[in-house]
Image (spheres, rainbow, N blue to C red):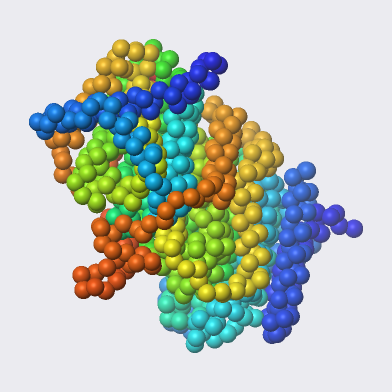
Amino acid sequence: MYPPELIAILILLLVPVCAAVLLAVFKPDLVRNILVGITSVIIIGTSIFLAWKALLAPVSVTLENAEWISLLLFIVEIAVAVVILGLSIKYRKILPFILSVIQLMLIVRLELFGIGKPEVIQTFMVNNLSVVMVLIIGIIGTLICVYALGYMKDYHEHQIGVPVRKRYFFALMFLFLSAMFGLVLSNNLMWILCAWEVTTLCSFLLIGYSRTPEAVNNAFRAVWMNLIGGICFTLAITFLLRLNSPVNLLSVDSLIHFPNVSVLTIPLAFIAIAGLTKAAQMPFSTWLTGAMVAPTPVSALLHSSTMVKAGVYLLVLFAPLFSQTWVGVFLALIGAFTFVVTSALAISQSNAKKVLAYSTIANLGLITACAGIGTPEAIMAAILLIIFHAVAKALLFLCVGAVEHKIGSRDIEDMDGLLVRLPLLSMMMVIGICGMYLAPFGMLISKWAAFQAFVSAPLGYVFIALLAFGSAFTIFFWTKWLGKLFMRMNKPPAEKIALHISEKISVIIMGVLVVGCCLGFPAIISGVIDPYLLTIRPYFIVTNAGFQYLDTLVMLALMAIILLFLVLGAFLGSKAGKTIPPYMGGRAVDTEGRFLGSLGVYKEAKTSNYYLEEYCGEKTLLKPSWILSTILIVIMLVLGFMGVMIWI
Amino acid sequence: MDIMFIIGPVLFLIIAPIFGGLLTGCDRILTARFQSRVGPPLLQPFYDVAKLWHKEKAFSNPVEIIFTTAYLVLIAFSGAMIATGGNLLFVVFSLALAHTFLILAAYAANAPFSHIGAERELLSLMIVEPILILLAAGCFMVTGSFGTYPMLMLDVPGIVFLPGVFIAFIAVLTLKLRKSPFDISTSHHAHQELVKGVTSSLSGRSLAKVEIAHWYEMILFLSLILLFFGGHPVMSAVMIVLVFLLEIIIDNVFPRVTWKMTVKSLWLVTLIFGVGNIVILGIFGGMFL
C-alpha cells in the first residue's frame, strides 16, 4: 500500500489530467461547472493535506517503475515539441520553429545518449518551499479556474467573433495545473524539464485562445522566449551529466547539497537563464506583457500568480548554490535592474492589465534578486514575496477582469469612483492594491525583509540603490490607481449588474486570503520559512544581520491597530457637516459635479493622472534596458564558464 | 533607554507641534523681511489653525475627514517611532503611507485643482522616497542597525561617513518643508489655486489637521538631521538652525522651479551624492569602521 503522502501527490498530478480529459469531452456548461467544482474541491483539499503532512516532516517518496514514467514523460516532451513545430509551420513562424527543432534534438540526444543507467533517486521531494508552491497552485490556481467559469460566459458575450472553445480552454487550464504540480513536486530534473515544457505549451495555446492576429503573434513571442529557457534548461542538464560525481546530480536534493559548487557554475548559469525567461525578466519581459491579450483568468493563472512563479521557484530552489557564485550576483543584478525598469514602465501605462503585468515582472525581479543573493534573509524575503505576490496579484487580476465586463473598459482612467459604482469589486481591489505596496501589508513586509537581506549582502549597496528608486516608482503607479478608485464619489451607483456566483466566490475567498496572509505572516515565517532555511543553512555563508523580529512585529501591530481604528472611524464616525460641490475655480457647479461653462452649459471637468510618458514610456525605456540586460546575461554566462566564486 | 522608550514619543507628540508652529511663524516673518514686508505675528500659525478648527464643517466628499485624520495620526506616529529609537525603514514606510492618505484625500475631493495637487504630491513622495531609503541604509552601514539611537551614540558624528547622503537629504528637505518648487503639490505661497494643490479643496478642520501634520512633519525631518550629528547637541542645534535658514533662502532665491526640474535636479543630487556615498561606504566600509 502506498503511503498517504504519495497518494496525495499522485492525486495532485493525475486528477487535474483526468479532469482535463473529461472537460475536453463534455460540452454542456452544467457538466463543466460540476466537474470544475468537484475537481477544485479535491485539489484544494489534497494540497492542504499534503502541505500539512510535509510541514510535519519533509516528505520524500520513491516510486517504483520510475523508468517507465521517464519514458512516458520523454514521449510527452516530444509531443510538446511536435505540437509547437506543427503550429510554427502552420503560421509560418521561423524563430519558434528553429528553436523548437534545437530543443527537440537536445532532448533526444540527452535521453538516448546522455543519461547512463538509471540510478535510483527519490522520485518526489516535498520540502517547505514546495509546500508554499503547492498551496499557491492548489488554492489560487483552482480558484482562478472556478472564476473562469463565470468569466468565460461574459467573455464570449463581449468578444463577438471569437470562436467559443470552452472545452479546449478548461482542459488546458487543468492540464497546466497538473504540470505545475509536477514541476514543484518532482525531484528529478528530467521530470521537471518535462513539466516545464508542458507549461510552456499550455501558456502558448492559451495566449492564442482568441486566434486574433495579435494573440497569435504574442503567443509565438511567448513560445520562442520560453523555448530559449527550455533549451538552457536542457543544456544545464547536459552539463550536469558531464560532471563526475559520486551522487546523481539529476536529483535536485543531492544537487542542492553538492559540496563543491565551483564545478557547478556552468549549469547554474544556464538554469539562471531558464529561470529568467520563465519569470519574464529583462530582456524577456515582452512575452508577459504580450500575454495580456489572453482572457483574464489566463493572465491571472499563467502569467501572474502561478506560471511565472515556476521560474522564480527554480531560482529560489537553487539560491543556496547561487549565493556562493558570481553567477548569482549577476542574476541578482538582472533581477534588481528589472525591478527598477519595469516599475518605471508601469507608471506610463493606463491599461490596468498592463500595469499589473509590469508590476508582476517588477516583483519577480525582486524575487530573482533575492534568489541570486541567496543568503538566508534573502531566501526568506523571496519566499514571502512569492506568497504575498501570488495572493494579492491573483485578487487584482480577478477584480480587473470582472470590472472590465461590468464597466466595459480596463483603462484605469475609466475607473474613477469605482468604489461607489461597484462596491464589492472595488473594495477587493483596494485590498489587493494595499496588499501590493502599503505598510503594514504583505508585500511591504517582504520588501522590508528584502532590504534587510540586501544591506548585509555582498555588493548590497548596489541593490539597495536600485531598490530605493524602484520602490519610489512602485508607490507612484499604485497610488494613482488607488486614488482613481476614490474619485467622483458623488456619482450614482451603477445599475444593478449581477456578478456571477463563481466570480463572487473566488474574489471573496481571495480577498480573505490576502488579509489572512498579511495577518498571519509571523506564522508563515516561523512555521514554514524558518524550518526550510534550517534545512539548507549549513551550506550558507553565515551572515550576522537578522530580521529584528519582535520590534518589527510590535510596530506593525501598532500600525495595524491605528489603521483598524481609522477604518472603523470611516464607517462609524460622524459625517455631520455640509456637503458642498467640488471647487472649480469659483464657477457654479451642479449636483453631478459639472461646472458652468462660459456659454451657460454645464460641462464635466476632466483631469487625468500623470503618466510621465516622456521618461517612463515603453519607447524610451525598453530598448536601452534590453541591451543592458543582455550584456548582464552575457557577463553572467562568461562568469559561469570561468567558474568564478565569491570569496568570503 | 527604557525610559526614553516612553518619554521620547510622548515628548515628541507634545513638543513637535509647538515647535513646528513657532518655526512656521519664524519662517513667515523671515520670508516677509526678505520681501521687505513686516509679516504676521510669531503666533499667527496657531491663530490660523484655531480659527480653522472652529469653522463650519464642509466638504465635497465626507471621506476626506478620515483621510486627513489618517494623515495626521500617521505622521505623528512616524515621528513618535523615531523618538522611540525605532526602525528607520519602518518610519520611511509609514511616512509613505501617511502621504498616501493625504493624496487620497485630494483625489476624493474630486476637483481638478486638488487632483493636480494630488499628482504633484505623489511626485514629491516619489522624489523623496529614495533618499530616505538611502538614509536608512546608510545608517545601517554605519551602525549595523536600522534603529535611530545607535546613530546618536556614535563617537564620531555620522556626517563623517554620510556626507553625500546629508547633502542629498538637505536638497529634498526643500520639498518636504513645502518650500520650492513653486508649482509642486502645495506651496506656502498662496498665489493661485493650482499652487495650493492638495489642500485647495480642504477647509475647516480637515485643513487644520493637514496644517498640524505639516508641523509634525517639519520637526520630524529636522530631527533626522540629528542622526548626522548624534552625540553633539550644540553642533546639531546649530546645524538645524543653519539648515532651516538655508531652506528659507533657497525658497526665496528660486521661486519658480517646475516639477520636471525638481525631479531631475533632486534625483540627480540623490544619485550623485546619496548613491555615491552609499557605494563608497559599501566598498571602503571595512576600512572606516
The answer to whether any part of residue A394 appears in the image is: no
Residue A478 is situated, as x and y percent measured from the top left of the image, at 43, 53
Q: Nearer the viewer, residue B219 or A537?
A: B219
Give how far across and how far down residue A349 sits, in percent: 37, 62
Q: Position of residue A238 (x, y in %)?
A: 56, 56
Residue at image location 61% in from the left, 56% down from the top: A511
Q: Nearer the viewer, residue B65 or A614?
A: B65
Q: Position of residue B220 (x, y in %)?
A: 38, 29
Q: Is residue A1 visible?
A: yes
Q: Is residue B289 above or below residue B185?
A: above
Residue nearest the viewer, comparing A464 with A548: A548
In the rendered structure, the answer to whether residue A635 lies left or right of residue A198 reads left
Number of marks:
0
Single out the residue that lies furthest toward the left: B36
Q: Residue furthest right?
A: A1
Residue A61, compared with residue A174, is above or below; it is above
Q: Relative to A107, does residue B69 appear above or below in the rendering?
A: above
Q: Where's the N terminus of chain A, which quadrant?
A: bottom right
Q: Nearer the viewer, residue A95 or A521?
A: A521
Q: Residue at x 27, y 47 (%)?
A: B196
Please name the residue shown 56% across and 74% down the image: A496
